[in-house]
Image (spheres, rainbow, N blue to C red):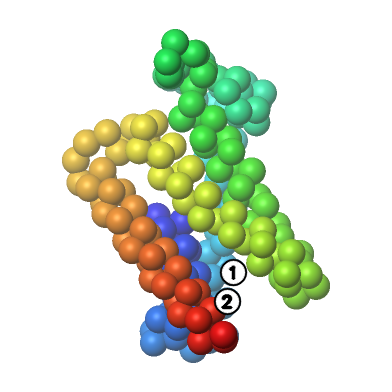
Amino acid sequence: LLLIILIILGIGLITGYTYRLMEPVTAWAVHRALGIALGVSILIHVFSLLFDKFIHFSILQLLVPFMSHYKPVTIGGVHLGSLYVALGVLAFYAAGIVIISSLVWKDKKPATWRLLHYTGYLLVLLVFLHGLYLGTDLKRGVLRVIWLFGGVVILVSIIFRLRRARTTTNDQK
């Protein structure tokens, strides 16, 4: 939920829609606070898996993609290990890249920060698939509907963001 709100708010900062709800300084502060909260929640999620009584994960399985054997996936006869756990591991690193670069480089290296910040779009996709296929609370019912709806809202937001980028580029020519 934090990631959904964070990405929509971030896209709204670029498109200007967020400023209809709050002042620019407040909007950027909220975006930053939500990013930090997301980072903390991801660390809690990963750390708590070390103590899960149902599925036992080692630190190596939580930090190295495709090391886990939880819900293995085979595609075309090729065993991939747990693809969906691997997506979560990759999302962990993508989140780290986005959050740390935002805290350290946003003002010092804006071009590098902007490039790394685009990793957030990949992060959303990884987390969406990871949660959809492994989230025990997302198997069925209202939470699954909310998750799928959130995915659609993010997709529509990204389309608005891309349209804005194309319009801005065409205006500059």
Q: Quadrant of the C terminus?
A: bottom right
At x 19%, y 40%, the residue is 141
Q: Which residue is mark 2?
A: 29
Residue 25 position by quadrant: bottom right
For this view, does 153 lie left or right of residue 104? left
Residue at 70% x, 57% y: name it: 100
Q: Is residue 146 above or below residue 55?
A: below
Residue at (52% x, 18% y) in the render: 81
Give coordinates of residue 143: x percent, y percent: 26, 46
Q: Is 120 displayed left or right of 9 in the figure?
A: right
Q: Quick one: 35 or 74, which is closer to the camera? A: 74
Horizontal side of 8 relative to 117 (left or right) equals left
Label 1 residue SS: helix
Asked whether the residues under the numbered discs 1 and 2 touch, taking CB atoms below 8 Å apart as contact, a structural biologist would say yes
Q: Identify which residue is drawn at 60% across, 50% down.
A: 95
Residue 136: which quarter of the image?
A: top left
Label disc, if present, on residue 32 of the rendered structure: 1
Secondary element at tag 2: helix
Residue farthest top in this picture: 77
Residue extending farthest left: 141
